[in-house]
Amino acid sequence: MENYFNYFTEIEEHFQRRRGGILLLSTLDWALIETWKDAGIPLEAVRRGIDAAFERYEKRPGQRKVNSLAYCSQEVLAAAEEMKEAAVGTREAGAAPAVKSSGLENAALIGFLQQCAEKIAAAKLPEGHGISSQVVARETAQTLRQMATETTTAAPRLEDLERRLTVLEEKLFAVLLAATPDDEVVAVRAQADRELAPYRSKMAGPQIAQLQKQYIHKRLLEKYNLPRLSLFYM
């Protein structure tokens, strides 16, 4: 995937250019980009989908500006499917694209890992009955520091590093979700439902469910000032 580690900013900037004005992306927008990334949708497919959505939208005079990436969801998925069909035989259907090195130096990787470790170690996390978020946080921070040390001696394969980060984040999020009071999670989910409401007709059920999950994930990490454990966020 071209510009793999710039996936989020490339999409944000392309959307803003087509919209014709600066608009800070919402939590819903960032969660949607996350679902595209997790689904292995190429950056070029997202660009094409955004372009197609705006071309259709601009044919309707007197409309207000598009204020969410969710408006482009159908076209992005259609563009991804078209690119997939055009590339039949080049890779297994549904396989995630390989991570390409984007010139990331070891020093940058080490700094990112260490910074994430410090933020997680310093975070004040909720404690549930029989659940110790702080223990998981300490173990996660320790693992990140170990990964940083390993990177000082040998440049890691970025694909492997990204997978390890994903596993760590999923474990941290699972314990955080379990320890967070139910009413707080329900409130976040309700907010996600309200923001999704205008776009439900443009999305399939599985996509809505994944987007809700990503929305809750992002909101809880933001609430407890936890970093995203992915090279996408370097």
Image: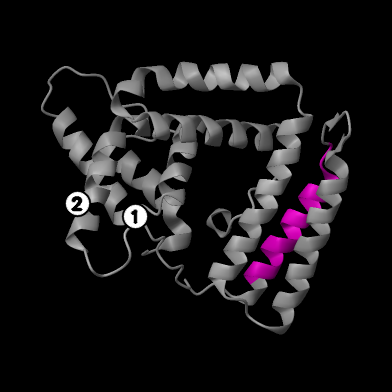
Check the image and report above or below for 5 versus 153: above
Check the image and report above or below for 26 versus 109: above
Question: Magenta part of the protein: which range?
Answer: 108-124
* Rendered location of residue 81, percent (x, y): 24, 49
Contact (Cβ within 8 Å) of mark 1 with mark 2? no
- Which mark is in front, 1 or 2? 2
Question: How far apart in space, not on screen, are marks 1 and 2 (Cα)?
Answer: 13 Å
> Which of the pair 25/180 is nearer the observer?
180
> Which of the pair 123/169 is nearer the observer?
169
- Does dot 2 land on a helix, a strand or a loop? helix
164 sits to left or right of 115: left
Q: Label 1 sits on what residue type?
A: Leu
Which of the 4 image quarters holds residue 77?
Answer: top left
* Rendered location of residue 148, percent (x, y): 74, 70
Residue named by callout 2: 82
168 sits to left or right of 129: left
Q: Label 2 sits on what residue type?
A: Glu
Residue density around tag 1, few if under 14, some if 14–19, many if 20 or more, within 10 Å: many
Residue at the image point whose x is 89% and y is 33% from the top = 130
Report the colour scheme.
one colour
Check the image and report above or below for 6 versus 175: below
Residue at the image point whose x is 67% and y is 49% from the top = 169
Which of the 4 image quarters holds residue 129?
Answer: top right
Work out whether mark 1 precedes mark 2 in sequence or the reverse, and give the earlier one.
Answer: 1
Residue named by callout 1: 43
Would you say residue 161 is visible in this rendering? yes
Residue density around tag 2, few if under 14, some if 14–19, many if 20 or more, within 10 Å: few
Specify the quadrant that holds the N terminus: bottom left
- Does dot 1 land on a helix, a strand or a loop? helix
Check the image and report above or below for 157 versus 142: below
Specify the quadrant that holds the C terminus: bottom right
